[in-house]
Image: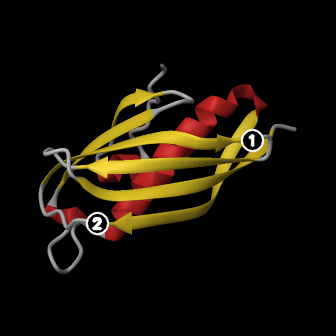
């Protein structure tokens, strides 16, 4: 397990911390804060989508290794429970890893272990030339 050094860009803005990262499983946590809220005072749905994409992309990249890189081609995320504060944990695992594409599922839970969001991201494997 090699946890990626990702502190810049969107990962840094969202405050994501990697607890575990491999080609078989990725675990990310972050704190919900007011600057991540939408106008109704709950966590913006785009944050969930971004986390799903990040989890899948990191796991997919680690699995593909030196063979290439990945890009997201589809992200479907459901919002199940409103969250205003606290820490969330996203756990991603592969559903399918093929020659040209991968599918990763991600479940996001709150501190009480309740499922607050779930999603999946389909990745295109890009070979190195």
**Most distant residue in the bottom direction:** 39
Q: Position of residue 65 (x, y in %)?
A: 68, 28
* Residue visible at 34% across and 69% down in the picture: 45
Mark 1 = which residue?
Answer: 98
Question: Residue 18's x, y, as percent?
Answer: 36, 33
Label 2 or label 1, whichever comes before in sequence order: 2
Q: Secondary structure at mark 2?
A: loop
Which residue is drawn at the image coordinates 77% and 45% (left, top)? 126
Residue 24: image x %, image y %? 54, 30
Considering every residue shown, the one lying at the far right of the view is: 129
Residue at x 73%, y 27% (from the top left corner)? 66
Q: Mark 2 Cα within 10 Å, few/some/many (few <14, many 20+)?
A: few
Which residue is at 14% across, 73% downward?
41
Question: Contact, CB < 8 Å: mark 2 with mark 1?
Answer: no
Callout 1 secondary element = loop
Residue 129 or residue 49, whichever sits in front: 49
Residue furthest out toward the top: 1
Query: Which quadrant of the figure has residue 73?
Result: bottom right
Neighbours of disc 1 within 10 Å: few (<14), some (14-19), many (20+): few
Q: Nearer the viewer, residue 94 or 84?
A: 94
Across and down, in percent, residue 81 comes to 22, 65
Q: How far is disc 2 from disc 1 in space, using C-alphas?
A: 30 Å
Provide the residue designation for mark 2.
80
> Image quarter for residue 97?
top right
Query: Which image quarter holds the C terminus?
Result: top right
């Amino acid at each position: 397990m090699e946890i990626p050094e990702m502190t810049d860009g969107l990962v840094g803005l969202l405050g994501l911390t990697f607890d575990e990262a491999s080609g078989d499983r990725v675990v990310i946590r972050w704190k919900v804060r007011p600057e991540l809220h939408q106008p109704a005072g709950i966590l913006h749905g785009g944050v969930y989508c971004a986390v799903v994409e990040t989890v899948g992309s990191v796991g997919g990249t680690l699995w593909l290794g030196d063979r290439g890189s990945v890009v997201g081609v589809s992200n479907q995320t459901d919002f199940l429970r409103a969250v205003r504060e606290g820490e969330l944990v996203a756990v991603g695992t592969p559903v399918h890893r093929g020659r040209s594409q991968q599918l990763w599922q991600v479940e996001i839970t709150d501190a009480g272990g309740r499922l607050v969001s779930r999603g999946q991201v389909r990745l295109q494997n890009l070979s190195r030339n």
